[in-house]
Image (cartoon, rainbow, N blue to C red):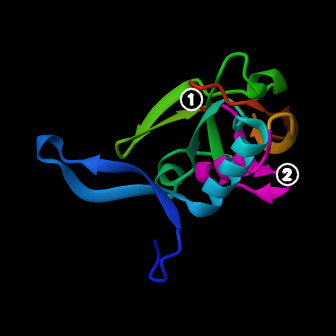
Amino acid sequence: LDAQGRVIGVNAQIQSGGVDGNVGVGFAIPIDTVKGVVAELIASGKVEHAYLGVSMNTITPDLIENVTLPVDAGVLVAEVQPGSPAARAGLRGGDNPVTVNGVDYVLGGDVITAADGAPVTSLEQLRDIVLGKKPGDTLDLEVIRDGQDLTISVELGTRPSTATG
């Protein structure tokens, strides 16, 4: 609740501190998300989320300082889930695992630089774009593959209950 008593989120998780209880960190689902999910549940009895089917890494300044990349911003496609919408569209994951300052990356795959014409600079940004779509929608991804600029259209699927990307 905010200071005026309006609901601004719904508690979803709390960080536990082992056997002694919680450590005072809670996580909530924003009220706008809750409203959309509730409306969809009322209308159809279920909620479906769009699904791309990739594991990704954000290109970070640390990575740029230590590895030669074709761009300074974007998202590395680390892995493409077999049979996923990304796999059907032809997106390619990497094959060269590296660790930079304790962070694991997979290089050699497609680099996503834009989605539906909007620049993409983080995996969170791309995730939010996908979450703003519905299963069956098309997402146009601008990628760099082997130094070539490509546009790949992906028909998004329905996220399975055990989705990893």
Picture layout, residue 146 above or below residue 60: above
- In-front residue for pair 62/140: 140
- Which residue position is annotated with label 1? 164
- Quadrant location of residue 40? top right
Q: Is residue 126 visible?
A: no
- Residue 70 relative to residue 90: left or right: left
Instruction: Please report the residue visible at 68 percent of the width from the left and 16 percent of the height from the top.
Output: 82
Magenta-colored stretch includes residue 34: no
- Which residue position is annotated with label 2? 116
- In-front residue for pair 50/14: 14
Q: Is residue 67 visible?
A: yes
| SS of the residue under disc 1 | loop
Magenta-colored stretch includes residue 109: yes
Q: From which residue to which does the magenta span run?
A: 108-134
As drawn, which residue projects farthest toward the left?
Answer: 20
As drawn, which residue projects farthest toward the top?
Answer: 83
Q: Amino acid at mark 2?
A: Asp
- Residue 70 relative to residue 68: left or right: right
Question: How far across and how far down the image is residue 44, in percent?
Answer: 77, 37
Instruction: Please report the residue visible at 21 percent of the width from the left and 55 percent of the height from the top.
Output: 23
Among numbered discs 2 and 1, the one appearing first in the sequence:
2
Instruction: Please report the residue visible at 52 percent of the width from the left and 68 percent of the height from the top.
Output: 7
Instruction: Please report the residue visible at 58 percent of the width from the left and 34 percent of the height from the top.
Output: 107
Near mark 1 (Cα within 10 A), the count class, few <14, some 14-19 or many ≥20, is few
- Residue 116 relative to residue 103: left or right: right
Q: Amino acid at mark 1?
A: Thr
| SS of the residue under disc 2 | loop
